[in-house]
Amino acid sequence: MAEQSTLSQLYANGESGLRAAGFTRPLPPDAALGTPLTVNRALLDSLFFTPRFFSSVDADTSTTIVGIPVTLPVFCGPMGGWNVLGDNAIVECARGFKDGGGLFTLGIGSGDDLQKAIDTGAPVAKFVKPYRNTDLIFQKLEDAERRGCLAVGMDIDHFHGRLVGDEVSLTDTFAPQNEDTMRRAIAHTKLPFIVKGVLGVDDARKAVEFGAKAIVVSNHGRQSVDCATPAVAALPDIVVDVGAQVEVYVDTGFRTGNDIVKGMAMGAQAVGFANSVLIAWGAAREDGVRQLLELLRAEMRRTMSALGCADCAALSEVQLQRILA
């Protein structure tokens, strides 16, 4: 087992570890454009809460994500390309999430990769891409259910391909899906369906209408549409509009336990981490991922206690102040 690190140490050691493992994809904030990433971080850093020290309580971070019990309201953002990091990377990361108490998810990738994650005993969800060949969508939903996934979903922010920096790719592979296809996809599985990439009330309402169990307010890191509304800015209006009808989650740029508290104070019921998970894996493989979740939980519990919040549901009552330096 690796020596216990602080969160800052984990992040500092992780990037060099990733490079040593052969991972060359750029990590934020180096995107040629990437404005949603920059603004998401700035918004999170501008939000503050007021402690209620005389009302301190023992805090419990346990909750559910689409009905799946977790001990921390965190999911791993669905990422592909795990094979670059070696045959064991998916297994190590999934085990880290199992031990750390979060929900592990996968995006594009093979059924064998998905099975490796499921076989660890971690709770796993599969996000299917919006394939131009719509038959693939239904086949992959069936495969995920058959293999033992606990939830499925779709990245609608890949309707127009993948954006990396200022280069667009995979437009021959992915395509916008019409409303009928989305209704059929959601009805095609018995599993809870999560629509990921929602950044406005219109898409949120349609996801509810189509039968989604949850939505993720997300810029897909750097890989959605640049200059689209940052997820942190979009979240409050979406929660007000559809939060009583569907579970609302958020990701993009979250890095700390206090970030989770802020996201949940704005109405999210879970928060996604992606690049942070990769970096933690780079620092100490499976143990690094486990440490990441444990450190997030420790900071979150401490802050919840100081806010007088005994459980995750109480965080929705926390009032945030925006203070600009």
Image (spheres, rainbow, N blue to C red):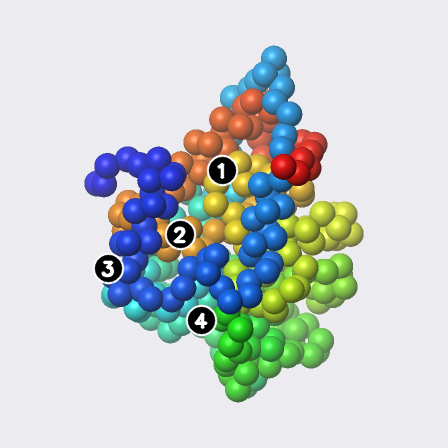
For marks 2 and 3 on the same chain, the one whose residue lies earlier in the sequence: 3
Q: CA distance from mark 3 to mark 1?
A: 27 Å
First in residue order: circle 1 vs circle 2:
1
Tell me where residue 33 sits by quadrant: bottom right
Report the residue marked by disc 4. 108
* In-front residue for pair 45/138: 45
Callout 2: SS: helix
Residue 90 visible to an observer of this rendering: yes
Q: Marks 1/2: CA distance?
A: 14 Å
Mark 4 burial class by Cα count in 10 Å: few <14, some 14-19, many 20+ = some
Q: Which mark is residue 257?
A: 1
Q: Which residue is mark 2?
A: 277
Amino acid at circle 1: Gly
Instruction: Tell me which residue sits at (23%, 41%) in the image.
Output: 2
| Residue for badge 3 | 20
Which residue is rendered at x = 59% and y = 51% of the image? 40
Mark 4 or mark 1, which is nearer to you? Answer: 1
Front position among marks 3 and 1: 3
Name above or below for residue 198 compared with residue 44.
below
Q: Amino acid at mark 3?
A: Ala
Which amino acid type is marked by label 2? Val
